[in-house]
Amino acid sequence: MPEGRGDDIPRGGSPDPPRPDAARGGCGDPPRDEQQQPQPRRDSSLAPLAQNDSVGRAQKDSVGRTGATVEADGLHFAYVRGEAVLAGLSMRADAGRLTCVLGPNGSGKTTLLRLLAGLARPGAGEVRLAGRPLASYRRADLARRVAYVPQETLAAAPFTVAETVLMGRSPHIGALGFESQRDWQAAAEALRQTDTVRFAERGLDDLSGGERQRVLLARALAQEPDVVLLDEPTAFLDIKHQHAIYGLLRRLAAGQGKTVVAVSHDVSLASAYGDHLVLLSRGRVAAAGTPGEVVRPAILREVYETPVRVRTDEATGRPYVLPRPPESSRFS
Ligand code: ADP
């Protein structure tokens, strides 16, 4: 089994707090000669800009692109020699669709997402973006086209929300590091879309985990990428914000034509919003297709090794899952 090459690849869109020397919203630190270093600064003009609805609604990506197909072809990956985490995994995520990656803990979801983002390289197999191998893209190009939203972390960061979201523009900012009006507008629109305008001038440290998670998404949206890859974007969120985020992801896909891939452990939430589900089991695809094709008792029982009941939401026609406690743990 070929080993993956994760260790030599710089992490990007990193779970670490944003740093001035790593300001980016996308994937991967660019090489030294391509590094751009916008200076985060406190500025109160972003919030009023975001509150102005006409700014957001009229907005189109400055790059004018929509999504791009992401394909994984026969991916193998191992962190430790001989222990395959991905074992010949193939999948695809199309533009204009919300693809949800599901699977039990440890099935390889985060690893797959990092490979799709170019943050780690497969030991064998290939990831393609818009038909071209990911490895053939310049880091700076990839940083503009692909945004990676890691799982929220609670590490301290000495920046305001506005500064953090503006860092998402770093792949677009010129060598001198000055933001243009367009950069400010994109950041303001991202704040508005993620309902974080009212936090704009607060420090990241002053936010709850869920609020900070929405700021990470705002930073990715400010980047105006073709592809948005999200790792458990609703892990810390209450029901209202879970639906708000998945509603937004759907609009990004269906409305703006982006390619959106979200890792989730919530089968019902993914089923309610996803266009295409990819269910992993031990580093392989156990099932892929529409929610109706994937969210089936027999498939879920086998993959999650636990019995479930599947019902259909009458309003949407989509399946959802009810846990079915094993006999041994039922109350009498
Ligand atoms: P999931 O996201 O589905 O929970 P992951 O991709 O995070 O799965 O992990 C898949 C497997 O790889 C797990 O067994 C996990 O312990 C292992 N793993 C993840 N990251 C590392 C790492 N940095 N070093 C060694 N093993 C790892």
Image: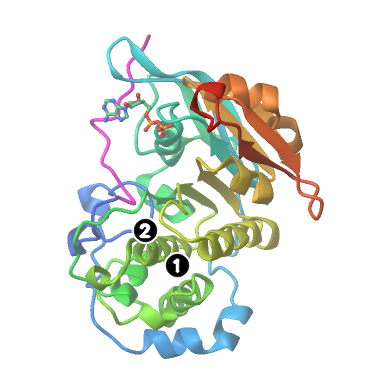
Q: Earlier in the sequence, mark 1 or mark 2?
A: 2
The amino acid marked with disc number 1 is Ala
Q: Name the residue at the front extreme.
A: 332
Q: Are marks 1 and 2 in contact (CB under 8 Å)?
A: yes
The percent position of residue 289, horizontal first and vertical second, equals 70, 33
Q: CA distance from mark 1 to mark 2?
A: 8 Å
For the point 64% across and 55% down, the residue is 253
The answer to whether residue 97 of the structure is visible from this angle is no
The percent position of residue 37, horizontal first and vertical second, equals 23, 65
The answer to whether residue 27 of the structure is visible from this angle is yes
Residue identified by numbered label 1: 222
What range is drawn magenta here?
Answer: 1-14
Direction from residue 219 to residue 90 in the image, left or right: right
Q: Is residue 272 above or below residue 177?
A: above
Disc 2 residue: CB within 8 Å of ligand 1: no
Q: Nearer the viewer, residue 224 or 312?
A: 312
Q: Is residue 129 above or below residue 223?
A: above
Assess disc 2: are there few (<14), some (14-19) or many (≥20) residues with their C-alpha within 10 Å of its C-alpha. many
For the point 44% across and 66% down, the residue is 218
Q: Nearer the viewer, residue 140 or 304?
A: 304
The quarter of the rendered structure image containing the C terminus is top right
Residue 298 position by quadrant: top right
Predominant SS along the magenta part: loop
**Is 30 within the magenta?**
no
The percent position of residue 80, horizontal first and vertical second, equals 26, 17
Residue identified by numbered label 2: 25
The percent position of residue 194, horizontal first and vertical second, equals 49, 70
